[in-house]
Image (tube, grey):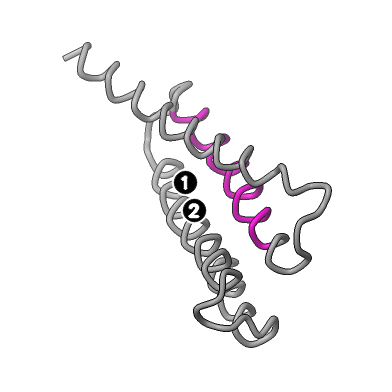
């Protein structure tokens, strides 16, 4: 829901012009937020609770907040003293995916 609201705000409230770098950054933030939120919801709906699933969910939620949030701040306020949160958030998203890869390899080994 928040990704859809922010996407609308990007064009109607913040008046971000198409084709600009700010438009591309804002669009990336919305896309990553929406896709990873769907993944988190799906993971949370699984009937099993494993360390790797919980770690993936936590990593992805923090990654969404820091990566997308960092891009939103960059577009709205420009580069600030907390711009470092964007790559940290991206690293957390990667860590979440790595957790899922480890889970997949573990399941293949058990079978």
Q: Which residue is mark 2?
A: 37
Q: At which x and y percent is residue 33?
A: 52, 57
Choose between 79 and 102: the one closer to the eye.
Answer: 79
Give left or right: position of 108 versus 72.
Answer: left
The residue sitting at 21% across, 12% down in the picture is 109
Q: Are marks 1 and 2 in contact (CB under 8 Å)?
A: yes
- Give percent across and percent down for residue 60: 53, 41
Quarter location, residue 98 = top left
Graded by Cα atoms within 10 Å as few (under 14), some (14 to 19) or many (20 or more), the crowding at tag 1 reads many
- SS for callout 1: helix
Label 1, on which residue? 40
Quarter-of-image position of residue 91: top right
Range of magenta residues? 53-72
Majority secondary structure of magenta residues: helix
Write the residue at 53% across / 73% down: 4
| Residue lying at 48% horizontally and 60% vertically, measured from the top left | 34
The N terminus is located in which quarter?
Answer: bottom right
Q: CA distance from mark 1 to mark 2?
A: 5 Å
Residue 77 higher or lower than 10, as above or below: above
Q: Which residue sits furthest right?
A: 81
Within the magenta stretch, is there residue 63? Answer: yes
Left or right: 44 in relation to 88? left
Question: Looking at this view, is 71 or 3 the one in front?
Answer: 71
Depth check, front residue: 24 or 10: 24
Work out whether 63 lies above or below 33. above
Where residue 25 appears, x then y in whole percent? 56, 64
| Label 2 secondary element | helix
Where's the C terminus, which quadrant?
Answer: top left
**What's the residue at 68%, 53% (across, down)?**
70
């Amino acid at each position: 829901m928040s990704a859809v609201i922010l996407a609308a705000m990007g064009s109607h409230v913040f008046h971000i012009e198409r084709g600009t770098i700010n438009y591309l950054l804002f669009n990336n933030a919305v896309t990553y937020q929406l896709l990873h939120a769907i993944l988190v919801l799906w993971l949370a709906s699984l009937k099993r609770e494993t360390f790797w699933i919980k770690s993936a969910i936590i990593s992805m939620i923090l990654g969404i907040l820091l990566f997308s949030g960092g891009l939103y701040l960059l577009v709205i306020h420009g580069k600030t003293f907390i711009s470092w949160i964007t790559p940290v958030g991206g690293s957390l998203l990667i860590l979440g995916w790595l957790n899922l890869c480890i889970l997949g390899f573990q399941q293949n080994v058990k079978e």
